[in-house]
Image: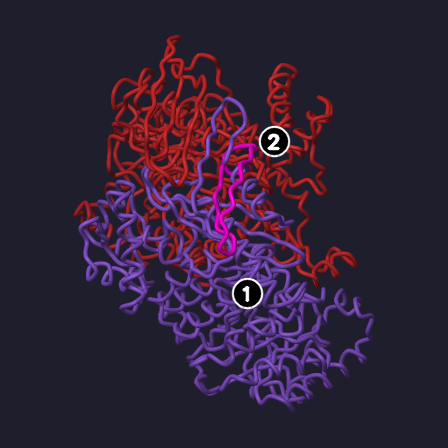
Chain colours: A purple, B red
Amino acid sequence: MTNVTDQDRVLIFDTTLRDGEQSPGATMTHDEKLEIAELLDEMGVDIIEAGFPIASEGDFKAVTEIAQRSKNSRICGLARANFADIDRCWEAVKHAEQNRIHTFIGTSPLHRAIPNLTQDEMAEKIHETVSHARNLCENVQWSPMDATRTEWDYLCRVIEIAIKAGATTINIPDTVGYTAPVESADLIKRLIETVPGADEVIFATHCHNDLGMATANSLAAVAGGARQIECTINGLGERAGNTALEEVVMALRTRNDIMPWRTGIDTTKIMHISRRVATVSGFNVQFNKAIVGKNAFAHESGIHQDGMLKNRENFEIMRPEDVGLSGTSLPLGKHSGRAALREKLSTLGYEVGDNQLKDIFVRFKELADRKKEVFDDDLIALMSLDDDDGNDHLQLVSMKVTCGTVGKAEATIEMDVDGQEVIATETGDGPVDAAFRAIRRVHPNTAHLQLYQVHAVTEGTDAQATVSVRLEEDGMIATGQSANTDTVVASAKAYIHALNRLIVRREKAGPGADAREISYKDLS
Amino acid sequence: MTNVTDQDRVLIFDTTLRDGEQSPGATMTHDEKLEIAELLDEMGVDIIEAGFPIASEGDFKAVTEIAQRSKNSRICGLARANFADIDRCWEAVKHAEQNRIHTFIGTSPLHRAIPNLTQDEMAEKIHETVSHARNLCENVQWSPMDATRTEWDYLCRVIEIAIKAGATTINIPDTVGYTAPVESADLIKRLIETVPGADEVIFATHCHNDLGMATANSLAAVAGGARQIECTINGLGERAGNTALEEVVMALRTRNDIMPWRTGIDTTKIMHISRRVATVSGFNVQFNKAIVGKNAFAHESGIHQDGMLKNRENFEIMRPEDVGLSGTSLPLGKHSGRAALREKLSTLGYEVGDNQLKDIFVRFKELADRKKEVFDDDLIALMSLDDDDGNDHLQLVSMKVTCGTVGKAEATIEMDVDGQEVIATETGDGPVDAAFRAIRRVHPNTAHLQLYQVHAVTEGTDAQATVSVRLEEDGMIATGQSANTDTVVASAKAYIHALNRLIVRREKAGPGADAREISYKDLS
């Protein structure tokens, strides 16, 4: 954490695990949350909003464990404006060396109407809840939800109350992504000028991208005096998402001449965490996404190539290596050895121990036997997939699928179910449907398929396909992934992977334990 | 076209077919370009930049035919700063009732170094080429490429020269996506104040999204006095792409209170053209893309649902129907009749005649027999695919594929090749590789697979998969698509579709005719 008085420093508050994770369909497993939190911590994120502890047992456990494991980052949890939320939040974040309680309430006329509170009643509630939070935790963030649509006088009044009650950070959320840069800068500037005590706290900006301006609005807020930007990896989040961490960080770095502020982010970690968040959330990044899109650094049209050859600066304001993309990248092949594999993995952001390297090398060799060239993206797919740890309840032994234009597709699946071999044959609409039906015959379940995605990892017909499958059963969600040069085999393995995760989660949690228990969940 | 003196009106200049189409991999076929141009014309785009006529025979033909067919839009072509380019451009755009020549040169020190011209030599070249263009066409746009990195005095000097030589629009491109809103507004404002004759022309802004600020930069330029925004559908374009049309248009509409300018765009056409551009370019839109992402209007977390039920305005600043998304959408089924299908297609933006409806209804019934519920997205996939017109050289008669974990995948493909039935069996790495190898056995070719994409259209294991295949052979590119509940069948059909298109293009054009002949291709 930086000092309030360091006026050049902008704090990065990442809410990938809270506001990002609540995007419809982006739910992450416990282990995935821990992994992303570790990457955020390593890349220099100042504050990690790790979840909404009272929302569910799963959220509470994730925030608790992230707090216990945190090294450099401050760990924050979200709480509504009531004591139960705040107490539960503290129980989770207190394990971190640096912690924060983030409490909020909707202050605009539209939001005051929901709990049906008068201005005075809400003001009193803010005083009580922020005071309560501050009695527990020395670092308290307070947010007036829908601030950009709250009456000016009332907004100033409640911010003053929150500061007096002990808030150390005041966050101004543009909950519906409604603002524009000039307005965003002006709002923060006027608040800091107007509200008594404003100079003793840090103002934060929390923007949504509904009109495509979240990055510009966040940076404008910093120009207006904000010193904390709330953001997510890949701009993950509901609707059009939140401000993208990679965009604000790289904009501040690239245009430091006109935006003389700095963050503590190690930008070379950006690509790796971007890929991991895309994989675990199932939210792919479009080719033409700023900074982290597949094409963000590509220059293929003629003029640009000419220009590039003559002077790289002509069309490149950032270097690929600044965000952790290795420059030229030669593919590995079947004759590549362990040292080459380890070195390549290291350039891709994976540091592996000897034992792990041994396992990975076996899988690499299997792949290299099937594919002539193993590209970076193939290795990333390989690394992105959990190893079967041998303890899985369900394991695929073999499968055979017949499909085509005549008759229905048919799949025969042989599986190991807790040590017993079971075979089933089913027909279906296409090979994937047939395979999934056969698996359901072997292991009957009522899980609903929420998402089925196929990505070709590299070019060529022998490319690996990565398949993601998301299943939902009784409010519990599990995602499975697999990569294979055979799409149908990858699909079956991803489905079985997701089923195994559902089984584990049910065993650990008891029925329904991970379903979010409250509907009032969000700050945005 | 609006009048220069109407100060509230911002012209929308769409360059999806020029700057967008030149993104690596986004190449469109002739027919696709005509379709997109028609949709742009219908939605009220003021100026369509239809291509770069001298770049290739294909570009020339596309611009020519789009010019011939245009109804409301002005048709523009791109030309470098030489007479041959400008003449070729005029030959193509002259067919439009309203036309424009857009000529450009890189004016920054980095770009002046490429042709190795002094400031004076380049100034003379600008004078000559703009004068030449204006002698051909009464509407001329001139762009100093990399304007944001050009010395201020020199930028003012060359703009003055271009205006005196007859340019009617001066476009200020931020070629590398380097600028920020305050700077963008200030640059346009100062240019208009400084350059003699600036009040007689329209200033345009052309932004790239490398730092995620293209939308905000474009709108800031308008605040500074620009009255033309250059943009693309879905922000298609090289690297992180161009300004997204849908974002600037919806931001101006939604925040008209602080940005009191209007466009002529019918916003209800946005979703349809967004989907078509995504399909034909192969550039998918990410879930959390502003305005046109799948989640842009989704509200699923608890608090938002509570809020939504109580007051829609709480979390919604735009209505889905404003961009052409129908509100609640009930799926069709096997008992749905023709009238229901026609009505549903109409709400999705497809107006079909009786004959076309007859064909579509047959395909709809086939699909409804396989799927219990036919969703909007299924129908969009159905409509997005070209009918086999019966004249194709290669047609799939039947196929059978076996795959799994034991041994290699094997595909037997029976095809009709110019009236003759040919069967081939091949093995491969996975069912798709085997099928593609069998097709290559039936119809030997050297086409390189550039892109293979699978999209599950709807939820559920019986979802249709849409497969896109892009092939490249001797510099010619063709994309094929197919949708089927069997992914492997869809893959084979998409591959055959692309091969047929390659054959047709080769017949029409002669060898190599569609390969771009020049490497100096772009304005950005």
In the rendered image, the quadrant that contains the N terminus of chain A is bottom left
User: x%, y% of residue B130?
Assistant: 32, 37
Q: Is residue A54 left or right of residue A326?
A: right
Q: Is residue A159 left or right of residue A6?
A: right
- Residue A428 in magenta? yes
Within 10 Å of disc 2 (Cα), the crowding (few <14, some 14-19, many 20+) is: many
Distance between the alpha carbons at the discs numbered 1 and 2: 42 Å
Whether discs 1 and 2 lie on one chain: the answer is no
Element on which disc 2 rests? helix
Label placed on residue B499: none
Q: Amino acid at mark 2?
A: Leu
Q: Amino acid at mark 1?
A: Val
Element on which disc 1 rests? helix
Q: Magenta: predominant secondary structure element? A: strand
The residue lying toward the viewer, choosing from A107 and A25, is A25
Q: Which residue is mark 2?
A: B379
Q: Is residue B385 left or right of residue A447?
A: left
Question: Is A330 rendered above or below residue A134?
Answer: above
Give the magenta-colored segment's residue range.
A412-432
Q: Which residue is mark 1?
A: A182
User: x%, y% of residue A346?
Assistant: 27, 64
The residue lying toward the viewer, choosing from B47 and B117, is B47
User: x%, y% of residue A401?
Assistant: 46, 34
